[in-house]
Image (spheres, rainbow, N blue to C red):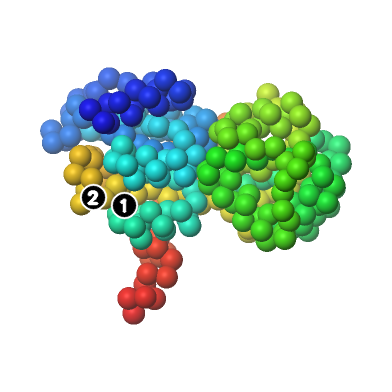
Amino acid sequence: MQRRTFMATVAAGVAAPAAGCARGGTDGDPGVAGETLTLATTTSTVDTGLLDAIHPDFEDLYGVTVDAVPQGTGAALETARNGDADVVMVHARGLEDEFLRNGYGVNRRDLMSNDFVVVGPGDDPAGVRDAPSATAALAAIADARAPFVSRGDDSGTHAKELTLWAAADADPGGDWYRETGTGMGEALNIATQQDAYTLSDRGTFVSQRPRLDLVVLLEGPIGGGPAALANPYGVMAVNPGVHGNVNYDLAMAYIGWITAPDAQAAIAGYEVNGEQLFFPEAVSEDPDLRQYVPEGRRDEEG
């Protein structure tokens, strides 16, 4: 009942993609067929249309339904921490590590990446185009007291923004700094309306660019910009030892599927307006073993 109440509340307040009916394909696993997987994820994976594009293959394969609940990373992890999700897909490694260290998540995998971009009005009153780094770009905005829209929602994008402000030794505040408490799409709309700068994940910006009066002023590493604007995504199961109600079998099937070559190829092939939005990271001849455990854990355990 707790899960049903939670999902009904989210459905009333968030425009989540409609879940299809359970499908029992010939390859479906009889142990999970007809069940529903609850995925707590970021707004970017939903707003870009990525999950709508790739999830039907998983649903058909196992005869299940995926309910993707789009939230900021902090809210998505809180949903999972409360036992209201089976699997999590987010993009803030520090928050993911905390989630793992506290025992709420298991079997984390690197999934995909894109990058962050600083966008703003074409006339660029703060001179962000001339900034040599991401921190210099934000320092220039603060020095000019140019309008800046912050998501202010404990999302992965918000966490990255706060890290950049701190590195720039800038204290955002005052009339020029506007926290919206919204998802990325709405923050971009507000930035357009107010001729403001903002930090966006590339995927959401590209997917909504035709409706925006904003331009990319500082590229992330995909466009040859600073590595500080890299945006990696991870996926992990909620620990069934903490929440016995989670669908751990289906969560692990999902993680296995989305990190396997076919789904990774589908992620690589997904484009909007002729641009690739996400770059697969799960299949590698030399995998990074640090993806499985929080930062420092391997050192602590010798």
Where does the image place residue 149, in percent across and percent down from the top left?
A: 69, 38
Question: From what the image shows, is residue 181 above or below residue 134?
Answer: above
Where does the image place residue 44, in percent across and percent down from the top left?
A: 52, 36
Q: Is residue 224 left or right of residue 49?
A: right
Q: CA distance from mark 2 to mark 1?
A: 7 Å
Does label 2 or label 1 sit earlier along the sequence?
1
Where does the image place residue 37, in percent across and percent down from the top left?
A: 28, 34
Q: Is residue 26 visible?
A: yes
Q: Is residue 42 visible?
A: no
Looking at the image, which residue is at 30% across and 47% down? 237
Q: Is residue 153 left or right of residue 188?
A: left
Question: From what the image shows, is residue 226 above or below residue 182?
Answer: below
What amino acid is at disc 1? Tyr
Instruction: Name the foreground residue: 30 vs 196.
Output: 196
Looking at the image, which residue is at 34% across and 45% down? 81
Q: Residue furthest front?
A: 174
Looking at the image, which residue is at 52% across and 30% down? 47
Instruction: Name the foreground residue: 138 vs 233.
Output: 138
Question: Which image quadrant is residue 295 in?
Answer: bottom left
Residue 104's disc is: 1
Q: Is residue 267 left or right of residue 160?
A: left
Quadrant position of the C terminus in the picture: bottom left
Quadrant position of the N terminus in the picture: top left
Residues tagged 2 and 1 counted as in contact (Cβ below 8 A)? yes
Instruction: Name the foreground residue: 56 vs 163.
Output: 163
Residue placed under numbered mark 2 in the picture:
242
For label 1, the SS is loop
Looking at the image, which residue is at 50% across and 51% down? 92
Where does the image place residue 183, in percent across and percent down from the top left?
A: 56, 33
Question: Which image quadrant is residue 228 in?
Answer: bottom right
How crowded is the residue under tag 2: few (<14 C-alpha within 10 Å), some, or many (20+)? some
